Image (cartoon, rainbow, N blue to C red):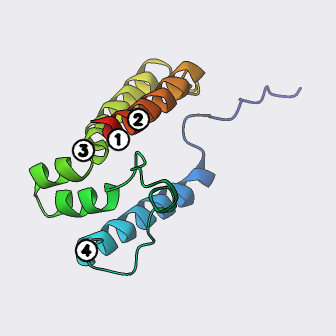
Amino acid sequence: MDQPTCPPRLDRPARWRPVWFLMVLMLGAGLWVLWHFDPARSALYPPCRFHAVTGWQCPGCGGLRAVHALLHGRIAESWQFNPLPILLALAGPVMLAAWWRWRRRHPGQAWTLSPLWAWAGLGGLLLFGILRNVF
């Protein structure tokens, strides 16, 4: 008689391990480049096309300079360049904690967010882009 087969575990597929490793490696390499090469002085980084065409600052303008200042511990200077990297650096651990909590309470189930969060984030970016050019 055939024995019943167990369904595959969904909590940690082995095929994702290299992807996570590569993502962490690329993030580390990018932060290393930002640490060593100041975006305000280096021609390594491309200029903002939106700013070049319109003269307005996009929501990301000053982001590389802000991350460079943040990596060197200059938080006030980073905030003056662009506050979004600081806010995202604070939101990252919060999202990681929410994911970890979901995984502990619902093993084997995928963690999904409502599309409302994506629309709220897009609306927030748009509002930030408008307000930073008005004031």
Label 2 sits on residue: 130
Label 4 sits on residue: 38
Circle 1 packing at 10 Å, graded few (<14), some (14-19), many (20+), is: few
Cα distance between the residues tagged 4 and 2: 27 Å
Residue extending furthest toward the bottom: 43
Q: Tags 3 and 2 in contact by the CB under 8 Å rule?
A: no
Pick whichever, 52 or 34, lies toward us.
52
User: SS class of the residue under badge 4?
Assistant: loop
Q: Position of residue 71 (x, y in %)?
A: 19, 61
**Which residue type carries mark 3?**
Ile
* Numbered mark located on residue 133 in the image: 1
**Which residue type carries mark 2?**
Ile
Cα distance between the residues tagged 1 and 2: 5 Å
Q: Is residue 16 left or right of residue 47?
A: right
Label 3 sits on residue: 86
Q: Position of residue 113 (x, y in %)?
A: 54, 24
Cα distance between the residues tagged 1 and 3: 19 Å
Q: Nearer the viewer, mark 3 or mark 4?
A: 4
Q: Going from the N terminus, do you reach mark 1 or mark 4 first? A: 4
